[in-house]
Image: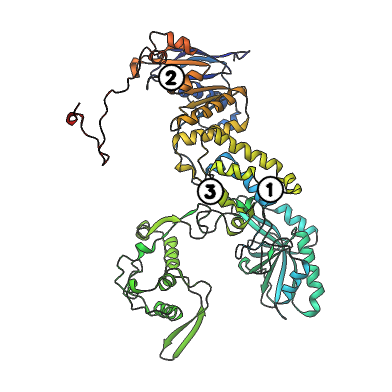
Amino acid sequence: MNPDRSAIEVRGAREHNLQDVSVTLPWGRLICMTGVSGSGKSSLAFDTLFAEGQRRYIESLSAYARQFLTQLPKPDVDGITGLSPSVAIQQKTSGWNPRSTVGTITQAHDFLRVLFARIGESRCPKCDRPIRAQSRDQMLARLLSWGEGAAVLVMAPIARKRKGEFRDVFDDLRRQGFARARVDGAGVSLSDPPKLAKNQRHDVDVVIDRLTIREDARTRLAEAIEHALRIGQGTLVVHRSEEGQGGAGEAENDLILSSEYSCATCGISLEAPTPQTLSFNSPQGMCPRCDGLGRSFDFDPDLLVPDPDKSFLDGAIKPMRGPIGRWRRHIFRSVAQHVGFDLKAKWRDLSAAARNALLFGTGDAHLTFEWRTRGGVFRHGGTFDGVVADLMRSYRKATSAMVRSYYEKYMREQVCPQCRGARIGPQGAAIRLGGRTLPELCAMSVDQLAEFVDGLTLGATERTIAEQALRELRLRLRFLQDVGLNYLTLDRAAPTLSGGESQRIRLASQIGAGLTGVLYILDEPSIGLHPRDNRRLLDSLKRLRDLGNTVIVVEHDEETMRESDYLVDFGPGPGVRGGRVVASGGVDAVCASAESVTGAYLSGRRRIEVPKRRRPVERTGKTKSPRRTKT
């Protein structure tokens, strides 16, 4: 490497159509490589400079690390000196994870999650009332209200959806005197704990006490609550079971009580919010229905009923193949009696409530089903989930590709009906900051969000807590504005971005990284950018240069050429007629070159004339042929 790093010297580059190119590029400058399309500028920038930089980086790693990486071929070049670590920011839209958004790529969403978790106002997901602290006496009164004889397990949560074997945790709990715990819903003995998979997520609760609620057990229950809150850091789990039941019980029957987050109106308690509670990429925060994607592949009611003139019993719902048997018929008959409609009526004549009940169920309503036999009437109760839930279960259980393909004919990708595209669960979506929820802020444009953040009113304590996060958030929003992406929203999915947008997002991320001594190579960053925003993009590139980096831009834009510190023109033609550096240096040097096509246009020796006559446009928007116009 050149000891003074004054320049990057390339000797004998022959990659693709390059014809033994040798060029010296000044270090720490904004360099523009231009020329006609196919003249070899990208071959030198990406396939030679960047490829060699990546290859050298991999070779600098240990032999152990290199065995996990693909061996990169050496570019066809005699030698390159003065090369530094290289970062390529190319135009590409493929390869983005569907979970990625503008907010996650730029890390702006991460700092918003921290703000909401630390200074946000928690609200009840059901009634939207502020969640207030729940005292020990309120918890005790609620458990006593279950009545005499109720058997309960009082537990303290140790881990929620965390990976690990937890051997040290089990040993520590056993040394503290605890005998039993619950792992993933199953009771275990701490004297012989289970061997857990290290790479799987687990729930671990330690059993504090197991008792039956009686008036004489009030003191013992209060002590168990106090102990559980201390071990669980303000949160405890109570499982109600039949009297005398020895197991720890299933997690679905748990009551979570928190000394900080509970809703007295709805009677629900929530765990303390964390940044993971507001993350759609974490099992703790993602919407349980769409798994944090915001969209679900679900059955479409319009596709399920192709012929609305049929009745439900006659097979209006097409995927319910075959006649409806007697057992299922008595279920549907009870649903019809509960809602009030006739199963023999045409589907188009049914009310919206009747259709919704058949397709999506009756919710938590308890129905009485009557099964008539020769011996009498057998009555049983329960809830009804709906036909769509049954079809979804059949679809998920299907192992045959043909069966799954059949069901998929009646399915369509649509906005998740539970989170309505917000991606996060109900607890995270209910937290507010400045009167707005996290999904509402992510749906704002970058300009609107920056204005909201600047106008946020906080108290003295909140300002101290949020100072660092607010500063980082403002920086990332400003970077997006500087590269002309002020119109984007943070919830914009990464796969929907154009090549120019994704490239400028990566550029904004690199500016925020603050690296120095790096060679940045960009591929036409001005594509798709309005001319009024081109100046802000150039200012961002110069800011990257001023940090102590070398910035190489492959570009056709005239303003970029004139603003660059060094210009390299390839040509004189494309393909085999190109592959040579016809001019290099400042803009004046390129303009003075007789062989440079770019210099001819920059100097004004050649120009693209504006047509003197244009084709008139009809009111319908169609253009007339110039042969039919009168001059």
Crowd tier of the residue under label 1, counting other residues whose Cα lies within 10 Å: few below 14, some 14–19, many 20 or above? few
Depth check, front residue: 561 or 214:
561
Is residue 102 toward the left or the right of residue 354 in the image?
Answer: right
The amino acid beneath tag 3 is Ala
Residue 36 at x, y percent in the picture: 37, 20
Pointer 3 residue? 443
Q: Residue at x 43, y 8 (%)?
A: 592
Considering the numbered disc 2 on the image, is that residue within a helix, a strand or a loop?
A: strand
Q: Residue at x 59, y 31 (%)?
A: 511
Contact? badges 3 and 2 (CB < 8 Å): no
Mark 1 to mark 3 CA distance (whole Å) = 21 Å
Q: Which mark is residue 457?
A: 1
Mark toward the start of the polypeptide (1 vs 3): 3
Mark 2 to mark 1 CA distance (whole Å) = 49 Å
The amino acid beneath tag 1 is Thr
| Outermost residue, front side | 631
Q: Which mark is residue 34?
A: 2
Residue 552 at x, y percent in the picture: 51, 22
* Position of the N terminus by quadrant: top right
Residue 556 at x, y percent in the picture: 42, 23
Mark toward the start of the polypeptide (3 vs 2): 2
Crowd tier of the residue under label 3, counting other residues whose Cα lies within 10 Å: few below 14, some 14–19, many 20 or above? some
The amino acid beneath tag 2 is Thr
Is residue 209 toward the left or the right of residue 514 in the image?
Answer: right
Is residue 130 toward the left or the right of residue 53 in the image?
Answer: right
Contact? badges 1 and 3 (CB < 8 Å): no
Q: Which mark is residue 37?
A: none
Q: Can residue 373 be seen?
A: yes
Considering the numbered disc 1 on the image, is that residue within a helix, a strand or a loop?
A: loop
